[in-house]
Amino acid sequence: RNLSAIGNIYIAKGQLDEAMTIQRRSLDIKKQVLGTLHPSVAVSLMDLGSVCHKRGYIDEAISLYKEALRVQKGVYKDQEHYMDFGVTMHTIGVLHQLKGEIVKAKEALTNASSFY
Protein backbone atom coordinates (compact mmCIF):
# COMPACT_ATOMS: atom_id res chain seq x y z
CA ARG A 1 0.00 0.00 0.00
CA ASN A 2 2.74 2.44 0.93
CA LEU A 3 4.57 1.96 -2.36
CA SER A 4 1.43 2.79 -4.32
CA ALA A 5 0.87 5.85 -2.13
CA ILE A 6 4.41 7.04 -2.89
CA GLY A 7 3.68 6.56 -6.59
CA ASN A 8 0.56 8.70 -6.22
CA ILE A 9 2.65 11.44 -4.60
CA TYR A 10 4.94 11.42 -7.64
CA ILE A 11 1.86 11.65 -9.88
CA ALA A 12 0.63 14.68 -7.93
CA LYS A 13 4.06 16.30 -8.25
CA GLY A 14 4.10 15.66 -12.00
CA GLN A 15 7.10 13.32 -11.76
CA LEU A 16 5.58 10.76 -14.07
CA ASP A 17 8.68 8.72 -14.86
CA GLU A 18 9.22 8.02 -11.17
CA ALA A 19 5.50 7.44 -10.65
CA MET A 20 5.38 4.89 -13.46
CA THR A 21 8.36 2.97 -12.12
CA ILE A 22 6.93 2.83 -8.61
CA GLN A 23 3.39 1.97 -9.73
CA ARG A 24 4.70 -0.89 -11.92
CA ARG A 25 6.74 -2.21 -9.00
CA SER A 26 3.78 -1.93 -6.66
CA LEU A 27 1.57 -3.82 -9.13
CA ASP A 28 4.15 -6.58 -9.59
CA ILE A 29 4.54 -7.04 -5.84
CA LYS A 30 0.77 -7.13 -5.27
CA LYS A 31 0.29 -9.72 -8.01
CA GLN A 32 3.04 -11.90 -6.51
CA VAL A 33 1.79 -11.62 -2.94
CA LEU A 34 -1.99 -11.38 -3.39
CA GLY A 35 -2.55 -13.09 -6.72
CA THR A 36 -4.11 -11.51 -9.78
CA LEU A 37 -7.71 -11.48 -8.50
CA HIS A 38 -7.55 -9.08 -5.58
CA PRO A 39 -9.14 -5.64 -5.07
CA SER A 40 -5.76 -4.09 -4.33
CA VAL A 41 -4.46 -5.34 -7.69
CA ALA A 42 -7.39 -3.61 -9.43
CA VAL A 43 -6.50 -0.35 -7.67
CA SER A 44 -2.85 -0.65 -8.69
CA LEU A 45 -3.87 -1.33 -12.30
CA MET A 46 -5.94 1.86 -12.25
CA ASP A 47 -3.12 3.84 -10.63
CA LEU A 48 -0.73 2.69 -13.35
CA GLY A 49 -3.39 3.39 -15.97
CA SER A 50 -3.66 6.93 -14.65
CA VAL A 51 0.08 7.46 -15.06
CA CYS A 52 -0.04 6.07 -18.60
CA HIS A 53 -2.95 8.40 -19.39
CA LYS A 54 -1.06 11.43 -18.08
CA ARG A 55 2.01 10.43 -20.12
CA GLY A 56 -0.07 10.08 -23.27
CA TYR A 57 0.17 6.28 -23.44
CA ILE A 58 -3.54 5.94 -24.09
CA ASP A 59 -3.50 2.41 -25.53
CA GLU A 60 -1.62 1.10 -22.50
CA ALA A 61 -3.95 3.02 -20.17
CA ILE A 62 -7.00 1.46 -21.83
CA SER A 63 -5.47 -1.99 -21.53
CA LEU A 64 -4.72 -1.47 -17.83
CA TYR A 65 -8.22 -0.17 -17.06
CA LYS A 66 -9.77 -3.11 -18.94
CA GLU A 67 -7.64 -5.49 -16.89
CA ALA A 68 -8.74 -3.66 -13.73
CA LEU A 69 -12.36 -4.10 -14.78
CA ARG A 70 -11.82 -7.85 -15.29
CA VAL A 71 -10.30 -8.07 -11.81
CA GLN A 72 -13.17 -6.07 -10.29
CA LYS A 73 -15.74 -8.32 -11.93
CA GLY A 74 -13.85 -11.40 -10.76
CA VAL A 75 -13.61 -10.18 -7.19
CA TYR A 76 -16.95 -8.42 -6.74
CA LYS A 77 -19.90 -10.53 -7.70
CA ASP A 78 -22.56 -8.51 -5.88
CA GLN A 79 -24.42 -5.36 -6.78
CA GLU A 80 -22.81 -3.44 -3.93
CA HIS A 81 -19.75 -2.79 -6.11
CA TYR A 82 -21.51 -1.85 -9.35
CA MET A 83 -20.41 1.76 -8.93
CA ASP A 84 -16.77 0.60 -9.12
CA PHE A 85 -17.50 -1.06 -12.46
CA GLY A 86 -19.20 2.10 -13.70
CA VAL A 87 -16.31 4.37 -12.79
CA THR A 88 -13.80 2.08 -14.49
CA MET A 89 -15.97 1.75 -17.63
CA HIS A 90 -16.41 5.53 -17.70
CA THR A 91 -12.64 6.02 -17.65
CA ILE A 92 -12.25 3.52 -20.50
CA GLY A 93 -14.85 5.48 -22.47
CA VAL A 94 -13.07 8.78 -21.88
CA LEU A 95 -9.77 7.27 -23.02
CA HIS A 96 -11.36 5.94 -26.22
CA GLN A 97 -12.82 9.40 -26.78
CA LEU A 98 -9.34 10.93 -26.46
CA LYS A 99 -8.17 8.58 -29.21
CA GLY A 100 -11.06 9.66 -31.42
CA GLU A 101 -12.64 6.22 -31.19
CA ILE A 102 -16.15 7.55 -30.85
CA VAL A 103 -18.01 4.24 -31.34
CA LYS A 104 -15.90 2.51 -28.67
CA ALA A 105 -16.24 5.55 -26.39
CA LYS A 106 -20.02 5.59 -26.78
CA GLU A 107 -20.22 1.84 -26.08
CA ALA A 108 -18.08 2.11 -22.95
CA LEU A 109 -19.90 5.18 -21.64
CA THR A 110 -23.29 3.60 -22.28
CA ASN A 111 -22.17 0.47 -20.42
CA ALA A 112 -20.85 2.66 -17.61
CA SER A 113 -24.20 4.38 -17.19
CA SER A 114 -25.89 1.02 -16.61
CA PHE A 115 -23.88 0.60 -13.40
CA TYR A 116 -25.11 3.86 -11.83
Image (spheres, helix red, strand yellow):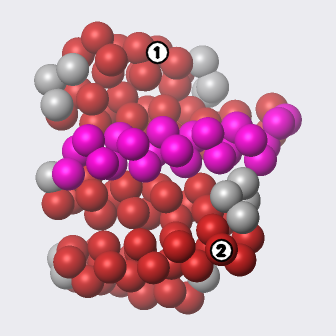
Residue at the image point whose x is 55% and y is 48% from the top:
68
Disc 2 residue type (three-letter): Gln
Nearest the eye: 37 or 4: 37
Q: Residue 51: horizontal and vertical position, in percent?
A: 29, 63
Q: Quadrant of residue 2?
A: bottom right
Dot 1 crowding, Cα within 10 Å, few <14, some 14–19, many 20+: some
Q: Quadrant of residue 106?
A: top left
All told, the count of numbered labels is 2
The span shown in magenta is 57-78
Q: Which disc number belongs to residue 110?
A: 1
Disc 1 residue type (three-letter): Thr
* Residue 4 appearing in the image: no
On screen, 100 above or below 68? above
Marks 2 and 1 sit apart, C-alpha to C-alpha, by 34 Å
Q: Residue 17: horizontal and vertical position, in percent?
A: 20, 78
Q: Earlier in the sequence, mark 2 or mark 1?
A: 2
**Residue 38 highlighted magenta (yes or no):** no
Q: Residue 4: horizontal and vertical position, in percent?
A: 49, 79
> Which residue position holds label 2?
32
Q: Main secondary structure of the magenta part?
A: helix
Left or right of 50? Residue 70 is: right
